[in-house]
Amino acid sequence: IRNKMWMKISRLYPKFTNPLWAERFRARAIIMLPILLKNIEIFIDAFSAFYERRAGQQMGTILAGAYSGFYSDKIVEYDWAKEWIDNQDWTNQSILEAETDELKCLYTILESAINVSTQESRLERTVSELIICVYSQTIEDVDSEVAQSTLNRHGLKYDHDNRMFWISNSHKAIYKFLFKSPWQSRWRDILMRIDGAIERSSVRFGPMTQRAIGVPSKVFIQEKK
């Protein structure tokens, strides 16, 4: 398919350009480079105001190239760029619809089931259900202390005060959650791509401490108003 598309583009090229035009366009691009780089930053920030930063980095770069290459030789105003982006229909852009690897990795962990022992019985709850229990104490039959201690035993921790979900970099339980997935041995690098993710050399999970990644809970929990 790619070869066929390239052949079509190659046939269209002589109809819309020529060697002289290409030479002038290349010279203009070189002269415009400082402005282009500035516009890339502005369009990335403007696009990221509506979508994920990763999508902003890709789409912002493309938009800056089009703006600087064909529309204006000036530095774009942030408010103008943001308004223009907000007025466009981006529903057909696959980059905005596709779930990123880092979120797939995170959701795989959140959807993993864990056995929970209470005074009355032995239950099975997902990681996300236990986090919600710690967050709002709404999960039936499991109190927040039991939920937190169960998470801790699996290299996980929800910090309610700072709204951070901590994930151990090396706990065997995380490896089991991600077994046979693309991230079973490198979840640290993948999760660090999430907006707002941080790393600490020492996070306490019950009686032990480990290096861990912290993910803001706003990524997967709708904050109460």
Image (spheres, helix red, strand yellow):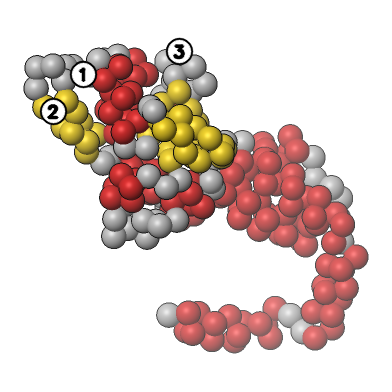
Q: Are marks 3 and 1 in contact (CB under 8 Å)?
A: no
The residue at the far front in this view is 207
Please report the residue visible at 45 percent of the width from the left and 13 percent of the height from the top: 225
Q: At numbered mark 3, what does the secondary structure look like: helix, strand or loop?
A: loop
Q: At numbered mark 2, what does the secondary structure look like: helix, strand or loop?
A: strand
84 and 176: which one is in front?
176
Residue on which disc 2 sits: 123
Measure the C-alpha gap from mark 1 to mark 2. Answer: 9 Å
Q: Are marks 1 and 2 in contact (CB under 8 Å)?
A: yes
Which amino acid, mark 3?
Lys
Residue on which disc 1 sits: 142
In the displayed structure, would residue 171 be above or below residue 124? below
Which amino acid, mark 2?
Leu
Please report the residue visible at 42 percent of the width from the left and 15 percent of the height from the top: 224
Residue 225 circle label: 3
- Residue 179 x %, y %: 29, 55
- Badge 1 local density, few (<14 within 10 Å), some, or many (20+)? many
- Badge 3 local density, few (<14 within 10 Å), some, or many (20+)? few
- Residue 158 x %, y %: 41, 26
Which amino acid, mark 1?
Val
186 and 172: which one is in front?
172
Earlier in the chain: of badge 2 and badge 3, it is: 2
On screen, residue 221 versus residue 162, left or right, reads left
In the displayed structure, would residue 193 be above or below residue 120? below
- Residue 7 x %, y %: 54, 86
Earlier in the chain: of badge 1 and badge 2, it is: 2
